[in-house]
Image (cartoon, rainbow, N blue to C red):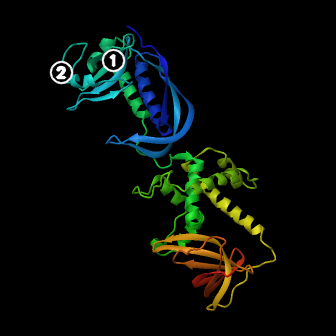
Amino acid sequence: MPVADLASTIHEIPLINVDRLVKLVAKYNRKLAKAKQPLVTFTEGDRVVKKAFYTDSEGVSRSIGYLEYVSITINGLAPSIGGYTLAAVIDCSLAGAIITPLEAGDYTPFRSKANQCDHCNITRKRNTSYVLRNVSTDQYMQVGKTCLKEFTGSLVDPNDYASFLTELADVRETPSNTPRGSEIMPLVEWLAYVCANATAHGFVSKKAMMEYNDKVDDHRKAIQSTANRALINVFGDHDGSGKISWEALEQSAKDMAVLVIEHCRSIVPSSDYDLNIVNLANEDNVSAKYFGYTASMVGMYIRSNLKAREAVKDDSVKSEWLGAIGDKFDVGAKLVSVRIIDGSYGSTYLYRFVTGEGSIMVWFASNEQQIEIDQLVNVYGTVKKHDMFNGTKQTVVTRCRLYPKPR
């Protein structure tokens, strides 16, 4: 009896499917051991991160984001058994034949004769048949499951081999969904989504989110961290909503992500946290385990920029409170920042001004104002509160109107 020729084959499979491959190889090896045949082994090779697609029930190719794939070399498979290779599996149990190709080829002619067998020449109701290809002549023939071992004359049951190849093809497929925590994507792309949200809503860390939400007695007023907002934009909310494609993302956010990475790579570490940030910034990709950690890079970059701006200010100029609470005022000032705060009842716009004397004014406006950063205006309004922020005096104002500042 001929023994199956052994060879090595290379396959690219999703990394999250490796455990399935381990179980599949172990199951097949138990059968090979009983037949006293050489066992199958496999080795892992290079890994690559790329956009993953699967084909849905309607034949439409859909993306599930990014996955890590690994090159697998399987050693000991039999490319030919008795001079034939298994080309396709035919499921004859249904009204119409379901053909699973194991190699490229046109198997349309076999759909109309799914219950035939070219070995025993008997046509009867079958559950499974196989299409074999002669490795010398490339001629195809169809053999029923019960005739396969007799036809090939192999010590290895060809049905076991066929089952292994069929399941291997399934292992190579991209799953239609991924277990939470298995996601991975290019670092620059992840940070671009974080930057977009930090720009639109201000940067909110996980700690700040938890501290704020602990004090809120109405869940509708709860806020989300910047990382959570970015995750929804990348992978979608629980109902699939909220996703934003990479193409639709603002170019400014993509550019900012590059600057964030450059900044974090240049940090001189002074703590374990800094060391972790530097190491993560030097990676090309980021896994779900570190989505939150790397999101903090954006907060670090923003804080660094703010400190740099503060450093160029005249240290002799100190912010002082304006007037008394309830006083009306009309003062010239420059807009230095705008932050949009989303809430259950709409958006609030936080405008931050600096007067010519260096005093800071903060205005929570319900409507967006037609004003640009660094623009000089006259602000007319009412003093609402004298506040302290990071050790600096600031005046919270309300019911404001803005007028162009005379030159």
Look at label 1 and name its amino acid.
Leu
As drawn, 59 above or below 96: below
Q: Quadrant of the N terminus?
A: top left
Mark 1 or 2: in front is 1
Return the disc, 1 or 2, that comes first in the chain's sequence: 2
Look at label 2 and name its amino acid.
Arg
- The reply, left or right, for residue 58 in relation to residue 40 is left
Residue 355 rendering spot, x and y as whole percentages: 70, 80
**To which residue does mark 1 refer?**
132
Please name whichever residue, 9 or 403, is drawn nearer the observer in this view of the structure: 403
Residue 388 seen in the figure = no
Q: Are marks 1 and 2 in contact (CB under 8 Å)?
A: no
Q: Residue at x 42, y 36 (%)?
A: 173
Dot 1 falls on a residue whose secondary structure is: strand
Q: Which mark is residue 406?
A: none
Residue 149 seen in the figure = yes
- The reply, left or right, for residue 394 in relation to residue 58 is right
Q: Which mark is residue 124?
A: 2
Q: Residue furthest right?
A: 316
Q: Quadrant of the C terminus?
A: bottom right
Please name whichever residue, 311 or 405, is drawn nearer the observer in this view of the structure: 405
Tell me where residue 375 sits by quadrant: bottom right
Tell me where residue 263 sits by quadrant: bottom right
Residue 342 rendering spot, x and y as whole percentages: 51, 70
Residue 147 rendering spot, x and y as whole percentages: 27, 16
Please name whichever residue, 209 or 381, is drawn nearer the observer in this view of the structure: 381
Marks 1/2: CA distance? 19 Å
Please name whichever residue, 153 or 265, is drawn nearer the observer in this view of the structure: 265
As drawn, 221 above or below 266: below
Q: Residue at x 42, y 46 (%)?
A: 177
